Image (cartoon, rainbow, N blue to C red):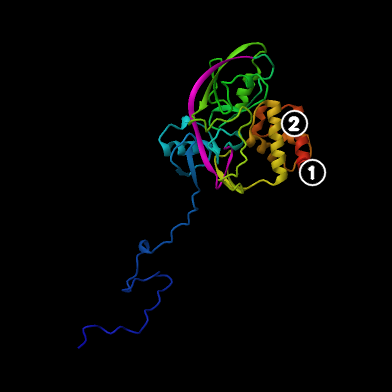
Amino acid sequence: MSLFKKKSSKPAPPPRPEEGPRPPNGRKLPTDEIPQSAPVQKPQLVFHCQQAHGSPVGIISGFSNVKELYQKISACYDFPPEDILYCTLNTHKVDMSKLLGGQIGLEDFIFAHRKGTPKEVEVIKSDESLGLTITDNGAGYAFIKRIKENSIIYNLPHIQVGDHIEKLNNINVVGRRHYEVAKMLKEIPKDSVFSIRLIEPMKSGFGNIGPKSSGAKSGKKQSYGSGKETLRFKANGKASIENEHDDRAKIGIDKINALLESFMGINDLDLATQIWELSVSKTNSMQLAEAIDDSELEEFGFTDDFIIELWGVITDARSGRIN
């Protein structure tokens, strides 16, 4: 007599549609035991980061705006997010051409520049223009992006590109937008003396120090970043992946940014991009002015002359007349 039962060749009956799947013993599974397929989750974008003055490489993800990015970086290295002045992409140097603005390439390497030495400088405003271009980090810190050669500030060695402007005549400007700080500097009377309190980025040796102009432009091949697809931060707090702008749009945005600098003393690629996008489908400067007045950009108070200048570079870029 065999100790093993002969395996039946008769196949198990298929489950009825209304009953759901059956376990091997044929018992009907309760509804709450029926296996459910897991929801499909989108892969989370992951970026590499490092402190610009030197640190181990960190891994960050799960942010949708600049403030959240700073919080992720500060949590990674265990310091307050308020310590971050700004970030550069693919270089640890104070290179203003590599500033992180409203978007990050999916393969970009992020370097965080932290607060370093504070300094206070007295300035004699001997000319109407100080020669400064101001930008901000998107989280309340305005800083110097460019210093015009042979200007008042250019001849003051203690004021450098990349310095954060903390106070003007003992008035705290932390939390103000860059155009507000630029306006305050512009309104200082000629031939008067004012004080400016600055905080320079933390440095390691001489590796981070850039030139007095717009920042170092290295001839070396960039070692990080593809520049093809970017994570763009939007005004509604969300972020989305977008392809790089076409050549004409890029030229137009750069020209708009140059006008912002010459008219207002600020540099803001994200603002220039917003203006370019508002101009889409507009056929004259009046329509552009109305679109700006109906948007959050109304607070800038652009003059009619400035709108006309904007429209000129937009139409030139659209037609391919500039490159």
Chain-order first, disc 1 or disc 2: 2
Any part of residue 208 in sight: yes
Closer to us: 58 or 186: 58
Q: Pointer 1: what residue?
A: 319
Is the C terminus in the top left, top right, bottom left or bottom right quadrant? top right
Name the residue rendered at 69%, 17% in the picture: 128
Magenta residues span 100-124
* Residue 307 marker: 2
Principal secondary structure, stretch drawn in magenta? strand
Closer to us: 218 or 294: 218
Tell me: 81 left or right of 216.
Answer: left
Name the residue rendered at 79%, 37% in the picture: 284
Q: Secondary structure at mark 1?
A: helix
Question: Which of label 1 and label 2 is nearer to you?
Answer: 1
Q: In which image quadrant can residue 30 be found?
A: bottom left
Q: Amino acid at mark 1?
A: Ser
